Image (tube, helix red, strand yellow):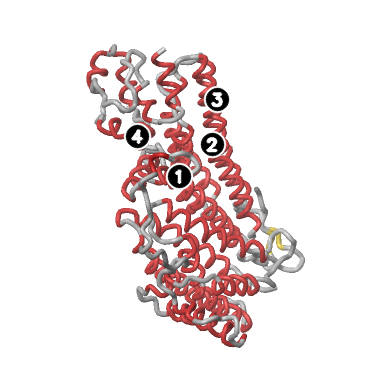
Amino acid sequence: IACLVMYLFAEFDDAANLLAANPDATTISIDEPVEIPKNQHSRLQEPGREEDDELLGTDDSDKTELLAGQKKSAPFWTFEYYQTFFDVDTYQVLDRIKGSVFPVPGKNFVRLYIRSNPDLYGPFWICATLVFTIAVSGNLSNFFIHLGKPTYHYVPEFRKVSIAATTIYAYAWLVPLALWGFLMWRNSQVMNIVSYSFLEIVCVYGYSLFVYIPTAILWIIPQKVVRWVLMVFSLCLSGSVLVMTFWPAVRDDNRRIAVATVATILLLHALLAVGCLAYFFDAPELEIPAPIIPAHNGTTVITKSH
Amino acid sequence: FPGLADVSISQDIPVEGEITVPVGSHSPDEDYSTLDEPVKDTIMRDLKAVGKKFVHVMYPRKSSALLRDWDLWGPLVLCVSLALMLQGGSADSKDDGGPQFAEVFVIIWFGAVVITLNSKLMGGTISFFQSLCVLGYCVMPLNVAMLVCRLVLLAGAGTISFIIRLIVVGAMFAWSTLASTAFLADSQPPNRKALVVYPIFLFYFVISWMILTFTPQ
């Protein structure tokens, strides 16, 4: 019952998620100071759950949980309510970006970096940067690929900016919504140790897209092998951030559902990357040295392959 | 009313005063009615204010005049002229051309609104329209760059013209970003300045990209 009460509070206060982590915890209301420090909890648990704590980050300082209970108390129609989602400093944003590009194996991005202070600054501006980076890089790459041809006339392809914006913002906001809904539904069936709020999921997705920005810039290089290597590399990095975040949330569920969820997350992520590469970047043309057939007007014909 | 039986109002207390509530300090504009002045005066006053702001952008010193008397005429004129100058670009098919008029308009205004909202959400002390005003006026160096680009393109579209255009657009982009940062960065808490300046950088970068990639028919 205590856990159900805590679960209800989670809708209104993200810090409750941390306190609900251990089903055996004493019921602690948000306004009271935490009576049992988190360190004692980890000692009382069985050894098999130690990696849980690593992923949950409960071995970190508990003073953030003390302060976390006082956030987000403004009603949702005031400006101050939305200001709480932008309550980050420069170094925090840079830390979160670093955490998404260099994922530490075994560390949960949400617990380590977000710590119940999800921000909307990162997801929004990383998506905006990614949109323009992909559009500009795609345009530049096509320009360099088609440069020598006599029939080529450069066009800025501005239409693709709107398409890129729609795709990336839809991915970064609708997929977290679907995932959050799915996790909430599973939470009602199976009591999970870890549950995330919608904003934390949006945060993870937003920051995990950051590694695609340098990838998109490097995709200007018109070599197929280079592009695919870059794609696999960035997919591994951002995919691992997502997997390490969401695996603890579905692990306690039916094994097949858990695996299917994580596989779907990765599949959608890969689909985004492959789709962007295919649509915005024209295939580089391979020049095969032989055979060169001199055409009747004296120019050589180079075979093309996609 | 039994309790009030012994209350009486003395006859010699004067009951008088003013009913009108005095208004606070009058701004200079309200000292005289502007209804009777010649139309030329009305228009010239606004034009002078806009012109003064253009000068402030050209030489970006920290001055409160730009912030205090905001107006959106300048940004509107700049935005419309930039969008018009970006027309007439190459379009083999309808799909692959440069930005349409509406796209430029939306990018500039929506971008400025989003940056202003971002700045206010991060705890900035500047008001909404002041920030829009500054961002709009600081598009002026890019307008100059667009003008130069069109003139250079009249002469030819080769590599040299591209290099000239790249240098000019790059310089104007830096000028715009520095000018708007000079006005806007001070209103932010110091540990978030970079977070507020970056979207401004992105905004002017996108506009510069649109200008640089403009190719005539």
Chain for numbered disc 4: A
Horizontal and vertical percent position of residue B18: 44, 68
Task: Say which residue label 1 marks.
Answer: A82
Which one is closest to the eye, mark 4 or mark 1? 1
Look at label 1 and name its amino acid.
Answer: Tyr
Nearer-N-terminus badge (2/4): 4
Chain of the residue that carries numbered disc 2 in the rendered image: A
Give the residue drawn at x 44%, y 35%: A200
Q: Secondary structure at mark 2?
A: helix
Q: CA distance from mark 2 to mark 1?
A: 28 Å
Which label belongs to residue A115?
A: 4
Measured Cα–Cα span from mark 3 to mark 4: 22 Å
Q: Earlier in the sequence, mark 3 or mark 4?
A: 4
In the rendered image, residues at marks 3 and 4 fall on the same chain: yes
* Tags 2 and 1 touching, CB below 8 Å: no
Q: Which residue is mark 2?
A: A269
Please give left or right for residue B198 compared with residue A138 in the image: left
